[in-house]
């Protein structure tokens, strides 16, 4: 009888036991699919962004609210300048987080969607930035022609 | 005759392999246990902060519950202002509710009821009991005071171990003592509101 290249009985039993144990262990262990830790930081920053837009959207405030900022926006040479009160308030909020921010105003001008970036908040975000936005009913015929609803888009990063 | 016999080498190799395999199988889930734990805590911190900031609480007069009635009445704290015309005002916290919440957290019996009703005591379901702490700070990082007493810095004592904190930017319905920020030497209220930061810390 040629014994070369053949599996012996006990080895066969040992091998099958190994496979059985391995399979059993794999099926018994729990696989947990959960967001990674860095995603939680993004969730936190995004929530703070929504909070900021909610807090500064005060219809009773004048220049420091989102509506007042849009109404009293000034522009020239392709730049858009928010009222000083708004810029100071938003800077104070961003410093408290702390985070950097970029503010864009997006509106529908007859046939096209246009974007304006606020002069003091025009830094370029890093790749891991988060973005939040809020729709505001406001107009400014000089700087944002035909705007009725303006999307205030805030990009935050650390 | 060597049919059906195992050599000593094979037996040793097999046992070493099995020991290593079992050790790795037991050890691997432990490597990620810390991270998983943090994520679990993060969920809780997020949930509690949302409940407090975006919900007026249950019942509508929960903030009238006194320390001697917290055992017998069912309630869930929520700090948001409820307006009959506009509904819940998200992020707008009622000073009256904050004071009631702080009062309940100060009482050793009531803090356990609050923990239970906020879903942080899962021991009856075979789960964990979470410790928590809630504080209200101004943008400079100081605790907000109202009539010269600290509004909210209550809950369990924060340990030095792993704590997960979730922050929310909120504004109060009344003027506190120190919610203004100093910009260029002037005292300024952000958007004419008393803006503060609510911090919810959760740990095991």
Image (cartoon, coloured by chain):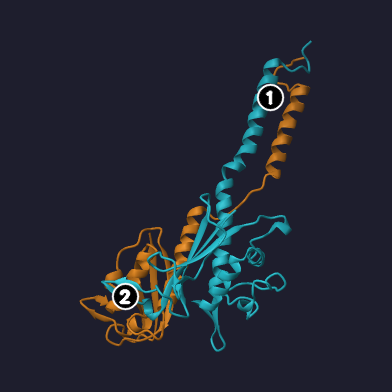
Label the orange chain with its letter: A
Q: Position of residue A143 (x, y in %)?
A: 28, 83
Q: At 66% across and 33% down in the image, what residue appears?
A: B22
Residue B76 coordinates in the image, percent (x, y): 64, 72
Which mark identifies residue B15?
Answer: 1
Question: Which residue in the rendered view is the most extreme toward the top?
Answer: B1
- Real-space CA distance between mark 1 and mark 2, rounded to the nearest whole angstrom: 74 Å
Q: Whole-percent x and y of residue A56?
A: 40, 77
Label 2: which residue?
B187
Q: Residues within 10 Å of mark 2 (few under 14, many from 20)?
A: few
Q: Which chain is cyan?
A: B
Residue B195 position by quadrant = bottom left
Q: Along the horizontal axis of the image, is B118 left or right of A139?
A: right
Tell whether B98 sits left or right of B75. left
Quadrant of the rendering where the C terminus of chain A is positioned? bottom left
**Given the image, what chain letter belongs to the residue carrying mark 2?**
B
Q: Quadrant of residue B192?
A: bottom left
Relative depth, front residue between A52 and B185: B185
């Amino acid at each position: 009888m040629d014994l070369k290249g053949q599996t012996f009985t006990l080895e066969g039993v040992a091998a099958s036991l190994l496979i059985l144990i391995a399979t059993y262990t794999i099926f018994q262990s729990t696989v947990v699919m959960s967001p990674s830790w860095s995603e939680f930081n993004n969730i936190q920053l995004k929530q703070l962004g929504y909070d900021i837009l909610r807090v500064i959207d005060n219809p009773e405030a004048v220049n420091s609210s989102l509506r007042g900022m849009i109404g009293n926006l000034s522009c020239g040479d392709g730049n858009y300048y928010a009222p000083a009160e708004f810029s100071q308030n938003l800077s104070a909020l961003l410093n408290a987080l702390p985070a950097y921010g970029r503010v864009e105003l997006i509106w529908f001008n007859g046939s096209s969607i246009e974007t304006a970036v606020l002069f003091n908040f025009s830094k370029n975000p890093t790749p891991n930035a988060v973005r939040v936005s809020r729709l505001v009913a406001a107009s400014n015929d000089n700087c944002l022609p035909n705007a009725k609803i303006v999307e205030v888009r805030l990009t935050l990063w650390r | 005759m060597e049919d059906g016999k195992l050599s000593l080498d094979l037996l040793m190799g097999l046992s070493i392999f099995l020991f290593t395999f079992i050790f790795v199988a037991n050890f691997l889930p432990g490597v990620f246990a810390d991270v998983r734990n943090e994520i679990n805590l993060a969920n809780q911190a997020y949930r509690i902060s949302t409940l407090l900031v975006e919900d007026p609480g249950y019942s509508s007069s929960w903030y009238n519950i006194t320390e001697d009635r917290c055992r017998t009445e069912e309630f869930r704290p929520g700090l948001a202002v409820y307006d009959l015309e506009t509904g819940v005002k998200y992020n707008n916290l009622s000073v009256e509710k904050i004071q009631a919440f702080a009062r309940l957290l100060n009482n050793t019996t009531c803090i356990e009821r609050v923990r239970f009703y906020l879903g942080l005591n899962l021991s009856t379901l075979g789960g964990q009991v979470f410790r928590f702490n809630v504080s209200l700070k101004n943008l400079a990082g100081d605790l907000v005071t109202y009539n010269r007493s600290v509004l909210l810095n209550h809950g369990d004592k924060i340990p030095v171990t792993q704590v997960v904190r979730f922050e929310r930017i909120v504004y109060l319905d009344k003027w506190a003592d120190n919610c203004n920020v100093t910009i260029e030497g002037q005292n300024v209220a952000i958007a004419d509101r008393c803006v503060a930061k609510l911090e919810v810390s959760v740990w095991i």
